[in-house]
């Protein structure tokens, strides 16, 4: 069975993709950074079949060592500084990891594989953030890119570098332009999880309000479990290419609040939500909605989980987590 190397193994997508590849019988290796990464135990518990390799996207020597250790047939480059708001605070670091990190992986593969480069397949985690100030609605593979954040600019670099390695070296390098995808494993800094956790806590009487930024921004939100399937499908194609992965539906942050509060039986959430300019961004991406028809026609991919089901799933999961946490706190002597 093939070997796969995943960067970003501790993240939301790294976990879902590992589960998918392990279920298909792959030998899965995950790159993990830091000398005592706090998420290592969680990864070992969640996906015990994954073999972890120490490395960092900014350290090319560690990437070449990771190739040597894992001898990958497929490489999924999911590692990144992925929180858009944070990318303004650490723009240089974001560029080093999210932009230059892609080049480091591509070049490591090229150097390591040598004459066997055509045996290796590469996936780059590109993003709908690259569309930024959108020049076309809905956004498709050919839509002009106009990024609005250091994160978006970095993803554009990685996207074009992936295409360049495909065109320069004939590498099987594909880029998935994924729109927002969420799950109970989503980081708490992102708006869906921030809301699902807060709504669960409000329902349990543990919190009074949620402090939010822009409620008018619209996103095309899908389920991460569906989206990792598309990553795998891209690397099974005879030729590499770029694909938009999206649901084709869009919802505002207000719609997200509607769906999350509805899951706990609250119709009018106005008394629970306060806006604070601290959560507004220097430049906003107002509207994202993807056209996934190429992925549907070529890959045979379509999402299974819809928006309301996704948000209800996240609130339900956070209700369980917060209930367990509250119980542990009251049990503490
Ligand atoms: P995530 O949960 O934020 O995970 C990011 C991963 O990158 C973590 O495992 C993190 O490791 C790792 N990482 C950060 N800096 C690194 C470095 N210097 N060297 C090696 N690894 C590093 O992101 P996600 O939601 O799973 O997304 C996966 C990828 O898809 C990312 O590239 C993201 O930008 C992209 N993407 C995501 C979405 C989405 O809606 N989720 C949409 C489009 C594209 P630590 O735990 O050690 O920090
Ligand atoms: O959940 P978000 O932080 O995700 P964003 O910025 O769309 O980025 C995510 O999706 C991208 C794909 O398009 C990925 F590439 C990227 O890595 C990441 O996974 O914010 C969504 C929207 C924004 O318009 C933001 O301004 O929600 C708005 N928002 C309003 N109040 C908030 C908040 N976002 C956050 N995080 N926190 C708030 O309180």
Image (spheres, helix red, strand yellow):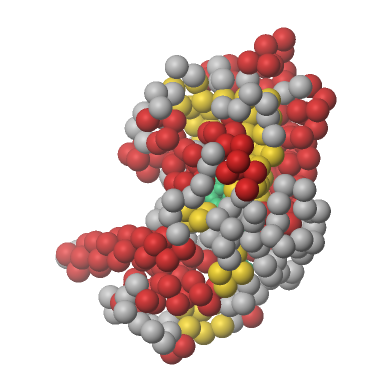
Residue 283 versus residue 58 in the image, above or below: below
Q: Residue furthest front?
A: 297
Which residue is rendered at x = 55% and y = 55% of the image? 247
Which residue is rendered at x = 64% and y = 61% of the image? 289
Front residue of 192 and 50: 192
Instruction: Please count the marks in the image.
Output: 0
Q: Quadrant of the C terminus?
A: bottom left
Residue 271 versus residue 205 in the image, above or below: below
In the displayed structure image, the side of residue 312 where residue 171 appears, left or right: right
Q: Pinpoint residue 258: horizontal percent, then vertical percent.
A: 45, 77
In the displayed structure image, the side of residue 141 where residue 2 appears, left or right: left
Which residue is rendered at x = 59% and y = 34% of the image? 234
Front residue of 153 and 215: 215
Does the image show residue 60? no
Q: Quadrant of the N terminus?
A: top left
Residue 219 versus residue 152 in the image, above or below: below
Q: Pinpoint residue 157: horizontal percent, then vertical percent.
A: 77, 44
Front residue of 90 and 147: 147
Q: Pinpoint residue 7: horizontal percent, then vertical percent.
A: 56, 35
* Residue 26 found in image quarter: top left
Which residue is rendered at x = 56% and y = 69% of the image? 251
* Residue 217 found in image quarter: bottom right
In the displayed structure image, the side of residue 41 where residue 128 appears, left or right: right
């Amino acid at each position: 069975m093939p070997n796969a190397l995943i960067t970003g193994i501790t993240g939301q997508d790294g976990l879902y993709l590992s589960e998918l590849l392990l279920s298909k019988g792959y030998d899965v290796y995950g790159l993990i950074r830091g000398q005592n990464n706090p998420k290592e135990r969680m990864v070992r518990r969640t996906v015990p079949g994954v073999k972890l390799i120490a490395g960092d996207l900014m350290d090319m020597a560690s990437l070449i060592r990771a190739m040597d250790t894992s001898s990958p047939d497929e490489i999924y480059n999911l590692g990144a500084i992925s929180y858009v708001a944070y990318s303004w605070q650490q723009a240089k670091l974001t560029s080093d990891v999210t932009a230059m990190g892609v080049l480091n992986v591509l070049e490591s593969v090229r150097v390591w594989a040598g004459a066997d480069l055509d045996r290796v397949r590469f996936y780059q985690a590109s993003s709908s953030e690259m569309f930024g100030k959108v020049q076309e609605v809905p956004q498709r593979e050919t839509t002009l890119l106009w990024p609005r954040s250091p994160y978006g600019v970095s993803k554009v670099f990685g996207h074009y570098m992936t295409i360049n390695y495909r065109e320069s070296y004939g590498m099987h390098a594909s880029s998935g332009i994924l729109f927002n995808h969420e799950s109970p494993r989503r980081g708490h800094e992102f708006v869906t999880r921030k809301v699902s956790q807060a709504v669960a806590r409000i329902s349990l009487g543990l919190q009074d309000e949620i402090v939010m930024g822009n409620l008018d921004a619209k996103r095309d939100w899908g389920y991460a479990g569906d989206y990792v399937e598309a990553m795998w499908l891209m690397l099974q194609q005879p030729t590499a290419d770029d694909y938009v992965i999206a649901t084709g539906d869009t919802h505002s942050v207000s719609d997200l609040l509607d769906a999350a509060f509805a899951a706990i039986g609250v119709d009018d959430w106005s008394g629970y939500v306060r806006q604070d300019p601290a959560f507004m961004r220097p430049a906003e991406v107002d509207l994202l909605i993807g056209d996934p028809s190429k992925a549907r026609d070529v890959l045979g991919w379509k999402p299974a989980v819809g928006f309301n089901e996704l948000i209800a799933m996240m609130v339900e999961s956070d209700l369980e987590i917060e209930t367990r946490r509250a119980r542990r706190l009251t049990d503490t002597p």
